[in-house]
Image (cartoon, grey):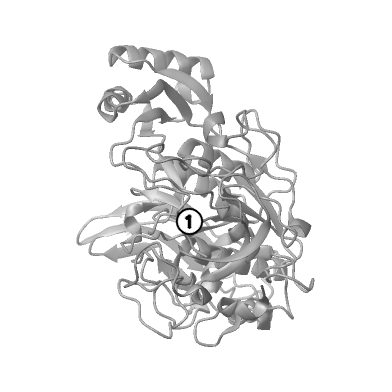
Amino acid sequence: MSVTLLAGSATAAVAVTPASDPAAHTLPAAGAPTAPAAAPVQNLIVGYKSSAPEAGSNTAAADDATAKGKKAGKKAKFDRRLGTGAALVSLGGATAPADAAKVMDQFRADPDVAYVEPDSRAYAMATPDDTEYAKQWDLFEPTAGMNVPAAWDKTTGSGVTVAVIDTGYVAHSDVAPNIVAGYDFISDSTAARDGNGRDNNPADQGDWSAAGECGTGSKASDSSWHGTHVAGTIAAATNNGKGVAGIAYNAKIQPVRVLGKCGGATSDIVDAITWASGGTVAGVPANPTPAKVINMSLGGSGTCSSSYQNAINAAVARGTTVVVAAGNSNADASSFTPASCNNVITVAATNRTGDRSFYSNYGAKVDVSAPGGETRRATDTPGTVTTPENGILSTLNNGTTTPGAEIYKPYQGTSMAAPHIAGLAALLVAAKPSLTPAQVEAAIKANARPLAGTCTGGCGAGLADAAATVNAVTSTPNTPFFENTADFAINDNSTVESPITVTGVTGNAPATLKVGVN
């Protein structure tokens, strides 16, 4: 296959119809402060080329880290191997960015090193504000709802596990029936607040922080219970006589804790992606119920890192659909991670009138939009709650620091939009288990409808429509879909070939063969 474009990079995909075999995708959370512009660096993530001894030997990686630290006049020590195969290198504590850069320069000068990057932090993307299906306009209102009830006669998510990589889970009776065993991936016991590092208890211990605790100028914040809010949107128990309805209410939620006090580390998040999708992470027991869908309502500034991309690619290769929030900075999603990564469904947020929510990120990286709500208008004072009825109502807790009583509360954010799509993905996989992540994404985008309002900057394929998407995948034969997820550079006025291996299909390609370039 040849593709000619003026500029950019391409990933190719092809949908094949057999000729002879008929069968055959801020407002920082109150509980998640904005990262300081020049935050200290504690660890580095180093990816070695597969041919390097350090790629497979912890001893060789440890020797290399020590030697490169010494050359830079700094301390560097091998800490552990990540689920992607990369090495986590400790700098011995909070290190000034300039000093960390000296160590990174040593790694970059080594031809055996594929990449090196700071172990940056991500933050929950939502704006917590302040029971009850009738209040869930996001599910059923014709103007800007996602047309979910009409899909429930065909699928409710049974048999599908959705991993919520977030702050963990605080006990809530409206979510409890659908919880399966998860894991706590927060390595730093101080950030985790549970007195230890990683363990098999993903309980949300609270992500509150004092002023200045998360960087110079950071404000004090209460606990957000963010992961529990996300979980309720996806799979709160339904038809149980109380609370809210989940989109895929017979799916299972696997809480995977990566966000604690002051956000979460990239190294913990990429290991969580690996484990949740059924991959192997050193020192962590195998996941007994790998997730077919991952929701990440989190992110930070910067383009997609190699660490994120490698973990995501591997998860998708295992058959897991990865859904991420576009971000809440009213900016182009291409400057945020993991929103800018490939192989994910990046989700922008819309409001009750069908416009792009004022805070939502936008741009070419956005794949689709979903209700994210607005608990205040764009012109209202930040921090106020003037239109709670227009937010996304879900499960929560009233504890300001440690857990209190269970409640329901509306939030706004792309963090609230992403779980709408994760829930829809679970409905699709339950209805048709043979669907690949690429087919799930393609179906959601192909069956989205135009926004009732406006979207400046680009909101992807439009507003996701649950019923239309479910109907499409359950009433049409499965068209074979083949994808090459590698990126190929495309120079100006040139031709580039991106090969795709097609298997399991006989005969010649039909005249209606479709090739997509992203």
| x then y, percent, for residue 66 | 40, 13
Q: Mark 1 sits on what residue?
A: 343
The answer to which quarter of the image holds residue 365 is bottom left
- Residue drawn 78% across and 58% down? 177
Q: Position of residue 81 (x, y in %)?
A: 53, 27
Mark 1, Cα crowd under 10 Å, few <14 / some 14-19 / many 20+, is many
User: Can I make out residue 509 in this image?
Assistant: no
Left or right side of 504 for 115? left
Residue that appears at 61% across and 78% down: 135
- The image quarter containing residue 40 is top left
516 vs 511, nearest the viewer: 516
Is residue 3 or residue 206 the one in the foreground? Answer: 206
User: In x, y percent, where is residue 337?
Assistant: 40, 50
In the image, what residue occupies the spot 64% across and 77% down? Answer: 470
Question: In the image, is 176 to the left or to the right of 440?
Answer: right
Residue 221 to residue 155: above or below: above
- Residue 226 in percent (x, y) is at 55, 54
The amino acid sitting under disc 1 is Asn
